[in-house]
Image (cartoon, rainbow, N blue to C red):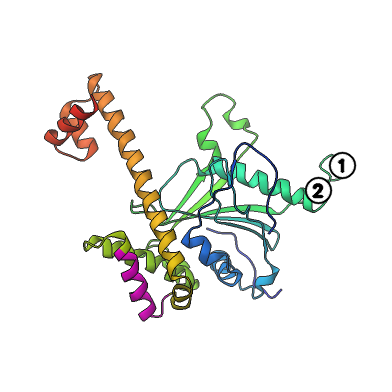
């Protein structure tokens, strides 16, 4: 294994029965691209400023074909004594540390079983270090780098400092214009981000999502961006992008509905004026009154 000093970041199907597990897993474009070990190694090297060269040294630990406690994992892998969990998100979710904790626990359970480790032994067992990275490319503006912690979800009490658990999530904004050094060191990640941006730009020009995807595929192939991948997986890419964009719109709709209900409740309790509620919702008083009439 050839390498340069690592600096920290600034397939086996699981058949166990569990009522939290759903076998209907929908693929994502991010997962399609980065389940290729060569691409995955490039991303790992870019994140950690390393120069490993042998993708076969990576052991994929992704829980295939399941959704565990509502979390769709894109890719997890064991490499260089690090248990890596990579996930793509097009919507911001502050509960990612909770989901990551539960998913990592499942991965470690498999690791302990597969390596015949005895957690009841008087000898200390050795475990790989967990690293959880989320690659965000939603439409809402977010910082280039964020750290989310499980402890942020704990109820405030005098015992907060004694919390037995912590799970840290590194969230990186991979929309074009952000994290330029990461893109410079991982061409395939930039190509992925460029393709997604092309789809969105086509939508802004009035194209339907179906047409926007076809236009982006044609444009990227002509520019030698994801060319081989898109030519080989044209139909599947169209399908997964449609699914992803529909889910993104659905999640956005749920958030907007929740926001509307909250503002209406505050207005009805005289905690906000009509003008304040409309301003918070980002609309006019007249439009908010129409919304109020529909909800009441």
Instruction: Please tell me whether residue 185 belongs to the stretch shown in magenta.
Output: no
Residue 272 lies, with reference to residue 106, above or below; the image says: above
Which quarter of the rendered picture does the C terminus lie within?
top left
Main SS of residues in magenta? helix
- The residue that mark 2 highlights is 125
Quarter of the rendering containing residue 254? top left
Q: Residue furthest right?
A: 122
Q: Residue at x 11, y 34 (%)?
A: 286
Task: Give the Cα distance between marks 2 and 1.
Answer: 8 Å
Q: Position of residue 100 (x, y in %)?
A: 57, 45
Residue 53 relative to residue 97: left or right: right
Mark identifier at residue 130: none
Q: Where is residue 246 in the image (x, y as percent from the top left)?
A: 37, 51
- The residue that mark 1 highlights is 121
Which quarter of the rendered picture does the N terminus lie within?
bottom right
Q: Residue at x 46, y 65 (%)?
A: 236
Instruction: Please tell me whether residue 221 belongs to the stretch shown in magenta.
Output: yes
Q: What stretch is highlighted in magenta?
A: 211-225
Quarter of the rendering containing residue 35? bottom right
Q: Position of residue 293 (x, y in %)?
A: 18, 27
Q: Residue at x 31, y 60 (%)?
A: 209
Residue 33 relative to residue 252: left or right: right
Residue 34 lies, with reference to residue 62, above or below; the image says: below
Q: Position of residue 121 (x, y in %)?
A: 87, 42
Q: Which residue is drawn at 55% across and 37% down?
A: 151
Residues 212 and 195: in front is: 212
Quarter of the rendering containing residue 203? bottom left
Residue 1 relative to residue 101: left or right: right
Discs 2, 1 touching: Cβ within 8 Å:
yes
Q: Which residue lies furthest to the left in this view?
A: 286
Q: Is mark 1 on a helix, strand or loop?
A: loop
């Amino acid at each position: 294994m050839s390498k340069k000093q690592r600096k920290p970041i600034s397939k086996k199907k699981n058949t166990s029965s569990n009522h939290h597990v759903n076998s209907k897993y929908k693929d994502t474009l991010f997962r399609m691209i980065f389940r290729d070990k060569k691409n995955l190694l490039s991303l790992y090297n870019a994140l950690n400023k390393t120069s490993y060269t042998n993708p076969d040294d990576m052991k994929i630990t992704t829980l295939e074909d399941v959704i565990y406690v509502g979390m769709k994992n894109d890719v997890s892998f064991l490499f260089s004594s690090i248990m890596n969990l990579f996930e793509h998100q097009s919507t911001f979710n502050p509960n990612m540390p909770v989901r990551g904790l539960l998913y990592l626990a499942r991965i470690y359970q498999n690791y302990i079983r597969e390596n015949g480790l005895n957690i009841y032994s008087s000898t200390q067992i050795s475990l790989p270090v967990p690293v959880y990275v989320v690659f965000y490319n939603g439409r809402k503006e977010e910082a280039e780098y964020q750290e989310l912690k499980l402890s942020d979800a704990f109820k405030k009490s005098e015992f907060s400092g004694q919390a037995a658990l912590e799970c840290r999530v590194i969230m990186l904004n991979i929309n074009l214009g952000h994290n330029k050094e990461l893109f410079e060191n991982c061409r395939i990640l930039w190509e992925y981000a460029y393709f997604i941006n092309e789809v969105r730009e086509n939508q802004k020009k009035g194209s339907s999502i179906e047409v926007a995807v076809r236009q982006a595929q044609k444009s990227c192939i002509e520019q030698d961006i994801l060319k081989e991948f898109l030519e080989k997986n044209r139909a599947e890419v169209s399908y997964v992008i449609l699914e992803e964009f529909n889910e993104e719109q659905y999640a956005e709709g749920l958030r907007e509905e929740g926001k509307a209900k909250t503002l209406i409740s505050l207005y009805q309790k005289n905690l906000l004026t009509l003008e304040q509620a409309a301003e918070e919702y980002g609309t006019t008083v007249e439009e908010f009154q129409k919304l109020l009439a529909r909800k009441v």
